Image (tube, rainbow, N blue to C red):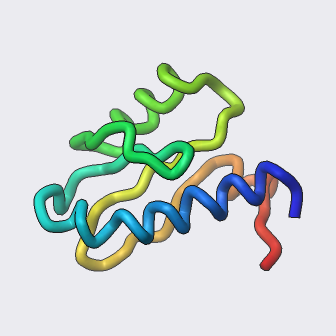
Amino acid sequence: MDEMQKKIVAEKEAFERLRPDLMRDHTGKFVLVKDGQVHGLFPSHRDAYAAGIERFGVGQVFLVEELADRPQPSVSLTWELGLVHVVR
């Protein structure tokens, strides 16, 4: 697993740890996670993603996830195009 893949897995694991507390007050929002920390809650995926690009820049690893009762599949163009993949 390369460094980028490790970062993606770490952000996803951090989100899963943070998720229960965030769900109490922020269900339906989108959370921006980088370096294992919440960097904002947003009304839409688009807003959270735009904030991530603005704050961290293109090519940086960050995670945007919806705080939903039923977890939604992660969507990423780099992931879908096969530019990034995780091997466990």
Looking at the image, which residue sits at the far left? Answer: 25
Looking at the image, which residue sits at the far right? Answer: 2
- Position of the C terminus, as image quadrant, is bottom right
Q: Is residue 26 above or below residue 45?
A: below
Q: Which residue sits at x=54%, y=63%?
A: 12
Question: Relative to residue 88, is residue 58 drawn left or right?
Answer: left
Residue 50 percent coordinates (x, y)? 44, 28
- Position of the N terminus, as image quadrant, is bottom right
Residue 7 percent coordinates (x, y)? 69, 53
Q: Which residue sits at x=69%, y=56%?
A: 79
Q: Which residue sits at x=62%, y=60%?
A: 10
Residue 20 percent coordinates (x, y)? 27, 72
Q: Nearer the viewer, residue 64 or 46?
A: 64
Residue 85 percent coordinates (x, y)? 78, 62
Q: Nearer the viewer, residue 86 or 24?
A: 24
Number of numbered discs overlaid on the protein picture? 0
Q: Which residue sits at x=31%, y=50%?
A: 30
Question: Relative to residue 85, is residue 9 drawn left or right?
Answer: left
Question: Relative to residue 68, is residue 11 drawn left or right?
Answer: right
Q: Is residue 56 above or below residue 69?
A: above
Quadrant in the picture for residue 27: bottom left
